Image (spheres, helix red, strand yellow):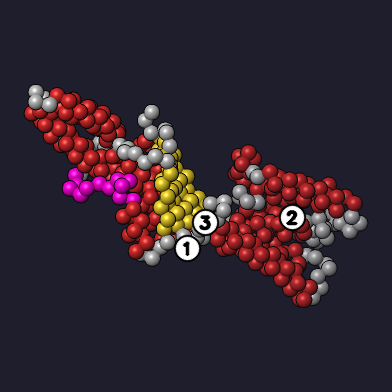
Amino acid sequence: MKLLHHFVADLHRLPLADKILAGVAVLIAAGDILLGPDWRGPAAVNVVVVTMMGLSLAWRRLRPLLTLCVVMGGLTLLSLAFGASQAWASVFITVIAVYSVADHGSNLLVAIPIIAAAIIVRDLNDPMIETFTDALWSSSVTTLIFAAGLTGRSLHLKKRTIETREMALEREEAEVATMAVAEERRRIARELHDILSHNLGVLVLQAGAAEQILEQDPERAREALRWIRRTGQEAIGEMGTLLGLVRGEPETSREPQPSLGDLQQLVERTRAAGASVELEIKGDQRQLPAALELSAFRVVQEGLTNAVKHASSSRIRVMLGYREHELEVEVSNDGIAGTHGRGSRRGLAGLRERLAVFGGRLQAGPDPSGGWILRAVFPLAR
């Protein structure tokens, strides 16, 4: 009763393919018994027993050992009652049960004696087996089937191992990307802190100068005040960005932050490392907010680093495009694009975080014309 309870409780969990297989096995076996000329014992008893054996195949992956017990129990019962099971009525079912327990079973040390006992009882009660060679052939076939199941088991274990490693790698890449984003946020915060400190310091100096020349040279004082207003507006925007990025106090740095005016020096350093780099500037070059220029510079810096490090490139092209409402930054190379896919992607994750701060967009991938391309677009205030 307990065995029957297990089978019934698992009905909704059975794979559809196994249910179909069980139905086909029952039809083949029942047809062989009812239509075949060489069956022993009452046909009704044979059909009932073989039907139970066939239906148990539906549980062959969920409960392979219980399925084996039902199949081998039926085989033993027919062998003891009528001399042997029918020629082909239960062979197909027995083959699947033996293979399944070797492939999916968790306790093979129990399954092996069950299989051996059922085969011995069947051979001893089968009048068609007259010599030791006949019995050896039957046991050899069963052994080969069991070995095939073990091979399938090994393949499944390898597949699960590969899937586990892939999942672990995906989790690791996600963690690395998250760490890169957090690191980039801290870096942006430090850079913005330095820019704000510089702008506010200059702003104070300009305010002092305006105060001193207010009466002697009102026009120069008004120009200083206009400069203070522009700088203050930039500082307010950068302060909002900084507050959105940081929860604590950012670290400070005394190093001057680069801008787009330093691109030529960056290109020269890359050329000195042995790379062929072209710099092209399109549109009317103009001064932009310091934080935006710094992030655009970082995009070019990351693109050049990746091109030199990962791509077998003969030429690298850096393009800076000034448009009315946006700034486009593009770094491309004619090297082998596929080599970029093996990196940790920390740099790209950091760049995406930078672009997100300004509401921009980043594209990185193989260039349709060959090589690899990194493109960033920064929206500009209208």
Mark 3 or 2: in front is: 3
Q: Amino acid at mark 1?
A: Ser
- Which quadrant holds the C terminus? top left
Percent across and percent down for residue 224 are 18, 29
Determine which residue is flagged by label 1: 314
Mark 3 or 1: in front is: 1
Magenta span: 252-263
Residue 16 placement: quadrant: top right
In the foreground, 176 or 316: 316
Cα distance, mark 3 to mark 2?
57 Å
Residue found 20% across the figure and 49% down from its top: 255
Residue found 17% across the figure and 48% down from its top: 254
The kind of secondary structure element at disc 2 is: helix
Is 290 part of what is drawn in magenta?
no
Determine which residue is flagged by label 3: 371
The kind of secondary structure element at disc 1 is: loop
